[in-house]
Image: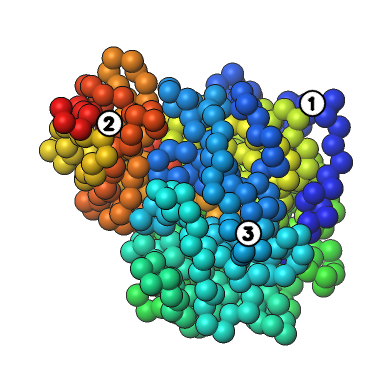
Amino acid sequence: MKSMLGQFTVQRDRGMIRNLVVLSIVVLTWCSFTSAQKWTQPDTPPNFNVGIALLLTDGRIMVQEQGTSNWWALKPNEFGVYHSGTWSTLAPFPSTWGYSPTYFASAVLKDGRVIIEGGEYNNGSETFTTTGGIYNPVTNSWTKIKPPTGWNHIGDAQSVVLPNGTFMMGNCGSPTDICTFGLQQAWLDEATLTWTIVGSGKFDGNDEEGWTLLPNGKVLTVDTYLGVPYNPNGTNSEIFDPTTKAWSTAGSTVQQLWDSHALCGQTKETHEMGPAALRPDGTVFATGANTCPSTAGHTAIYDTKTETWTAGPDLPGVNDMADAPAAILPDGNVLIDVNPGYGNNPSTLYEFNGTGYVSIPQPAGLTGNTEGGRMLITPAGTVLLNHVGFPEMWFYSPKGTYKAAWRPHICAGCYPANCYVGKTYTVKGTQFNGLTQGSFFGDDAQSATNYPIVQITNNATHHKFFARTHNFSTMGVATGALTTSTEFTILPTSDGTEFGDSTMVVIANGIPSNTVGIVVKEQGQ
């Protein structure tokens, strides 16, 4: 469960700037700062309190006005720079819905639309609403969705888009015991907007758990022991197989990750968890939550090749990652947000490099704790950090870069030589969806970017603009040599499209493909 009080009543002193130097700790691999690592705030800050951000397939960033029905779009400038971009309004949820959610399930779908489902809070009240809808960026409109049959609560549900493009969402609970005994999952048919109940053999309730899509197409979760007898040292994890539609154990995480207060000798557990992020090397870095004073949260590492867990390094200092964001940087490091106990200030950001933690500069003026953090990977290779409930956002520019083998690749002859405004084309290649979902959170607030983005650069002006991608051949990750594809539509000049000799790349999780040449033409040329 999350506290809106802790979310929106953070005491702030806007005259103070956080010290950019953090204390050294023994688990750091290295702690030197580099000028290449920096945080940049937008040239035009949002004039609203920000919520979750999602990447539309035309390159714009879709941002909720926190706790309201309103949505905004941030479009990068003509050189693809987001912090110098411009804001515009998007269609809000229709007023007849009465839908202004906080903490909900979200995803970009295979056809390029966006789904928003449920909400722990609605219009400021804790209702675990079942309302939800799909946003169509072409028509700038919302379509309401009925909840799965028998589901009286959705709330802050976890969700994932499976490799075949099916959106799967967890059941938060029952009318008599909210967010405790919810064992069901549901698949959405995007054509009919109807649900199919799936999932059998789940060890415990879904609530507070996050879902990580694996290279084999299965889904990993770390159990939080809701709806089962209290086990203060429980370490079970599970795998969902979309083929069998069933759960099975994925073994012990070795170290306890969910918050049971076991180290405090108490039983007033929060059941909170941190994000579990799939890295390009095929390991999942799973982070722990711990609200005991003066005790660090644990981590564990799941090897997707051997299907085994090992203990990871404890989080820096006495910090934990209960309800916290994380994002995979282009170089494979994990950007993490930690705080000293669930709901406690301050929030401090690090990079995890596979063996230890790297100290980095901190966002100027950031206060609060991890519960207010939301991350999104941009096509520019930066990471957007939103501070939920405040008009604040930063873009993080990391130091490292990607390995050549991680890049998407457009195959020879698998793209059009000439493109016309308003027309739709297909481009094919490999690894169009990247090696990971990209961004993660403890349970809700999903903002995955494992889908292809097409960016075009005009040779004469060097201006960058996007086509709109849709109908991806897969939503899987780390697809290797499998041929993947996406359709893309050339947008009108009002969206920044320029005519003439150009180059094109396909971007996944901020990593661009090889460059190919195309010519963008006006209709009738």
Q: Where is residue 520 in the image (x, y as percent from the top left)?
A: 23, 28
Q: What element carries label 1?
A: loop
Q: How crowded is mark 3: few (under 14 residues within 10 Å), some or many (20 or more)?
A: few
Type of the residue with mark 1: Ile
When the figure is inspected, residue 152 is found, relative to residue 118, above or below; the finding is below
The N terminus is located in which quarter? Answer: bottom right
- Which residue does the numbered mark 3 point to in the structure image? 95
User: Type of residue at label 2?
Assistant: Met
Residue where numbered disc 2 is placed: 504
**Residue drawn at point x = 54 percent, y = 75 percent:** 147
Which sits earlier in the primary sequence, circle 1 or circle 3? 1
On screen, residue 268 versus residue 442, left or right, reads right
Observer able to see residue 314: no
**Distance CA(mark 3)–CA(mark 2):** 40 Å
Q: Secondary structure beneath disc 2?
A: strand
Residue at horizontal 45 percent and vertical 45 percent from the top:
56
In the rendered structure, which disc, 3 or 2, sits on the residue that comes first in sequence?
3
Residue at the far left: name it.
Answer: 413
- Residue 481: assigned label: none
* Residue ID for mark 1: 17
Distance, label 2 to label 1, CA atoms, is 41 Å
Up the image or down, 492 lies above or below 489; here it is above
